[in-house]
């Protein structure tokens, strides 16, 4: 709007400097993440080379026989381009065709997983098979020019069994998202439709709880969790579990920590749904719960998906709670990377740590790509209402 | 909605919060006045080592934990009053430093060191985050429509990245002969190591936090800028207000509620700074309050966790939160009362 208005016309200098600043910010924002992605596919000597060019082109990696030819790069980029394009065009239409109504969320989850699997198969399975003979045939164009190796990823996911940590992360995150949304939507709806002082005080209390450092809470859990088998013995007998080290105990803890934020956010979404909608259902003879199930649930998904994204981030990014409450056997990804610090003695170990870090970031990158709009709307919804 | 239905809706959530937030708080409060220790006893232990002709036997008095019937170490819990708080605060050393006039000595004590960093970190990054966020929002608002989407996408990356990984990614750029350290060394011609003294680490931490949170401020300000009243702006132009005056007198007052919101969230999140300490591995130089509590909770070499001291330091951390939130909460309460009357 401001660009079209005559009075708002801007001088060239202002426009230039504003765009230059924007470019500078984009570089600053993306550089560290892109750089560790580049480092993770180079041999240790290249990854920690002094000159940036050496890191990018990886002469040392190339010398060891790992590299991409011009054809590899071209074909890889083409496949990548179509993969991303189809993610935004074909995938939504497929999902829309095979799932309806409330099955849409499950449809998206299945669709995205299947898509990711097919992409991985094609990109890392089929493509190298096609490219190997192609490179041999084309001579100069088939010579490797860009050093690139996947050995660190193989080491991290294979030898170091990072997939175990990945599975644990997925388990914890999935648990946190589903339970906090189930509990949170009910509470958020109740809070949005109640005007009592009690509702206000609950929200204020939730705000205070949100401010608590997590270490304070963990200090409260630890003694109980470690001794829970003995404390619970009078109630559950010999079946009583030691909560320390149990993923589901961590899920419960993270759900509770996440509750204040979830109910605030969902409340502001439910306030945007007109109250007339459920009142009409109530007039037709529905109870509050029936009105919630039949009238509100079909229209609440945008808000729930947005809140779910932030719950996902909380569960996935957590270091403090999982590192203190889980033991080494069922550690999640983020604390597991701290394990690399302790044995990070050689440069190979360091680059493996970099590869593990990139592996943790990749799903988040996909998440921003797919859900950018929801994340932005979630951030602003909290601010404008909260 | 009557009370019963309301209660039925919020009950699961309230139950979770009571069980996993309110009760642990009570438990921490009680623990901070108690110390749980293994029961020790002194035993005469004869240790024999095989020697030539006869065994060499030594009898010594050893302090050993009592093993109970179930094969576990017996523990006792004692009320010790403010003992744990004294251990954390180390007031005697503080008074000593004060009376001898060497104020720097206070910052040698872990708690005060952590407090100094946490407060400075929180208060210094706050204006930076709001300033940088506002700048990006204004620049994006000026930019052509086609570039806005990609810019928002790139901006969200630092915000969404796992904090430990984000700080690690910056750590790797600067560590040892990292690419940016090498570059700075080339320019300055001197040997630079960013992780050998605390002030350079702190600088990188400030940078990391602004990098991580500014996108959040940006997205919110950007949404706020879309609702600025154009008529007010145009009349300000007619009145001859310069660009800067328009920003100061029209746009910023319009964004004020958002600035307060961001400040509140930022204070809460920054006060519990922790992940940076792990990512930058700075525990030898820079520590924060939350890190201190976690450090007490982490088992030491003998496998003991200093629960009592952790609880004391946790309670002290809480006092800070109360101070931090008292002003915004009073404001919310006044608003609530105001809206209830009108």
Image (cartoon, coloured by chain):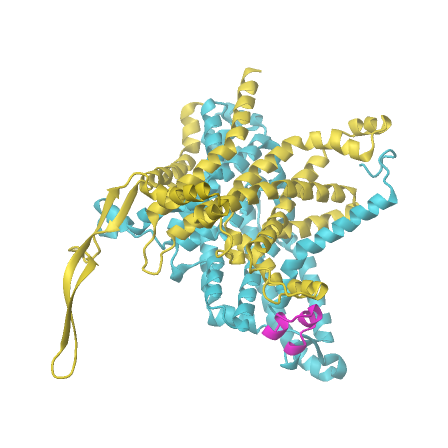
Residue at the left extreme?
B54
Q: Is residue B316 left or right of residue B327?
A: left
Q: Is residue A301 magenta?
A: no
Residue at the location (57% across, 49% down)? A99
Closer-to-camera residue (B250/A282): B250
Closer-to-camera residue (A289/B102): B102
Q: So how many labels did they put on this image? A: 0
Residue at the top extreme?
B341
Horizontal and vertical percent position of residue A293: 49, 35
Horizontal and vertical percent position of residue B290: 46, 47
Against A128, residue B270 (above or below) is: above
Q: Colour of chain B?
A: yellow
Q: Colour of chain A?
A: cyan
Against B131, residue B183 (above or below) is: below
Residue at the location (51% across, 27% down)? A193
Question: Which quarter of the rendered picture does the C terminus of chain A lie within?
Answer: top right
Closer-to-camera residue (A136/A7): A7
Question: Which quarter of the rendered picture does the N terminus of chain A lie within?
Answer: top right
Q: Is residue A56 magenta?
A: yes
Horizontal and vertical percent position of residue B88: 39, 45
| Whether residue A177 is visible | no
Magenta span: helix, strand or loop, mainly? helix
Horizontal and vertical percent position of residue A315: 49, 50
Closer-to-camera residue (A242/A63): A63
Residue at the location (28% across, 50% down)? A227
Residue at the location (49% across, 61% down)? A337
Find residue B58 and report its image quarter: bottom left
| Whether residue B247 is visible | yes
Query: What is the span of residues highlighted in magenta in the rendered image?
Result: A42-61
């Amino acid at each position: 709007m401001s660009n079209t208005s005559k009075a708002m016309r801007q001088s060239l200098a202002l426009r230039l400097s504003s765009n230059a600043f924007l470019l500078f910010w984009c570089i600053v924002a993306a550089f560290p993440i892109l750089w560790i992605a580049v480092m993770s596919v180079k041999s240790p000597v290249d990854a920690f080379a002094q000159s940036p060019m050496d890191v990018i082109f990886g002469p040392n990696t190339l010398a060891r026989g790992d590299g991409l030819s011009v054809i590899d790069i071209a074909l890889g980029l083409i496949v990548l381009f179509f993969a991303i394009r189809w993610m935004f065009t074909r995938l939504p239409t497929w999902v829309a065709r095979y799932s309806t109504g409330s099955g849409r969320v499950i449809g998206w989850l299945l669709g995205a997983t299947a898509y990711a699997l097919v992409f991985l198969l094609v990109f890392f399975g089929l493509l190298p098979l096609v490219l190997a003979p192609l490179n041999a045939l084309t001579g100069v164009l088939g010579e490797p020019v860009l050093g690139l190796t996947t050995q660190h990823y193989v080491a991290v996911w294979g030898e170091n069994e990072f997939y175990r940590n990945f599975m644990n992360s997925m388990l914890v995150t999935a648990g946190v998202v589903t339970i906090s949304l189930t509990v949170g939507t009910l509470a958020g709806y109740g809070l949005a439709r109640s005007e009592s002082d009690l509702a206000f005080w609950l929200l204020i209390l939730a705000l205070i709880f949100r401010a608590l450092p997590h270490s304070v809470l963990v200090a409260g859990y630890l003694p109980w969790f470690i001794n829970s088998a003995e404390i619970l013995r009078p109630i559950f007998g010999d079946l009583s579990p030691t909560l320390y080290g149990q993923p589901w105990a961590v899920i419960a803890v993270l759900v509770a920590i996440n509750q204040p934020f979830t109910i605030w956010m969902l409340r502001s979404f439910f306030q945007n749904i007109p109250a007339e909608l459920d009142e009409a259902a109530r007039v037709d003879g529905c109870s509050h719960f029936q009105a919630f199930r039949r009238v509100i649930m079909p229209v609440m998904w945008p808000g729930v998906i947005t809140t779910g994204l932030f719950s996902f981030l909380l569960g996935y990014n957590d270091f403090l709670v999982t590192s203190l409450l889980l033991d080494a056997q069922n550690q999640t990804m983020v604390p597991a990377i701290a394990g690399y610090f302790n044995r990070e003695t050689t440069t190979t170990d360091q680059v493996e740590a970099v590869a593990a870090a990139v592996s943790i970031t990749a799903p988040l990158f996909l998440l921003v790509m797919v859900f950018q709009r929801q994340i932005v709307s979630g951030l602003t919804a909290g601010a404008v209402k909260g | 909605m009557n009370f019963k239905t309301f209660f039925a809706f919020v009950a699961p959530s309230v139950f979770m919060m009571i069980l996993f937030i309110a009760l642990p708080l009570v438990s921490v409060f009680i623990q901070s006045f108690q110390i749980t220790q293994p029961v020790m006893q002194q035993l005469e232990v004869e240790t024999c080592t095989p020697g030539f002709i006869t065994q060499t036997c030594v009898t010594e008095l050893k302090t050993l934990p009592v093993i109970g019937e179930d094969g576990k170490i017996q523990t006792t819990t004692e009320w010790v009053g403010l003992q744990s708080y004294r251990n954390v605060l180390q007031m005697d050393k503080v008074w000593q430093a004060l009376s001898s006039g060497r104020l720097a000595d206070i910052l040698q004590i872990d708690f005060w060191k952590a407090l100094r960093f946490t407060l400075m970190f929180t208060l210094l990054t706050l204006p930076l985050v709001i300033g940088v966020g506002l700048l990006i929002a204004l620049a994006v608002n000026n930019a052509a429509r086609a570039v806005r989407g990609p810019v928002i996408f790139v901006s969200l990356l630092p915000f969404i990245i796992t904090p430990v990984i984000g700080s690690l990614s910056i750590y790797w750029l600067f560590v040892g002969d990292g690419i940016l350290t090498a570059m700075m060394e080339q320019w300055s011609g001197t040997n630079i190591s960013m992780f050998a003294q605390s002030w350079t680490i702190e600088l990188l931490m400030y940078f990391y936090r602004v990098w991580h949170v500014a996108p959040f401020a940006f997205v919110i300000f950007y949404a706020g800028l879309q609702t600025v009243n154009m008529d007010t702006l145009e009349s300000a132009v007619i009145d001859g207000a310069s660009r800067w005056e328009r920003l100061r007198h029209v746009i910023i007052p319009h964004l004020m509620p958002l600035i307060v919101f961001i400040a509140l969230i930022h204070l809460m999140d920054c006060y519990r700074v922790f992940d940076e300490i792990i990512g930058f591995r700075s525990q030898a130089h820079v520590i924060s309050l939350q890190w201190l509590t976690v450090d007490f909770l982490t088992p030491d070499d003998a496998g003991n966790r200093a629960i009592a001291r952790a609880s004391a330091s946790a309670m002290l951390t809480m006092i800070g939160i109360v101070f931090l939130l008292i002003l915004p909460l009073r404001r919310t309460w006044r608003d609530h009362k105001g809206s209830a009357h009108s």
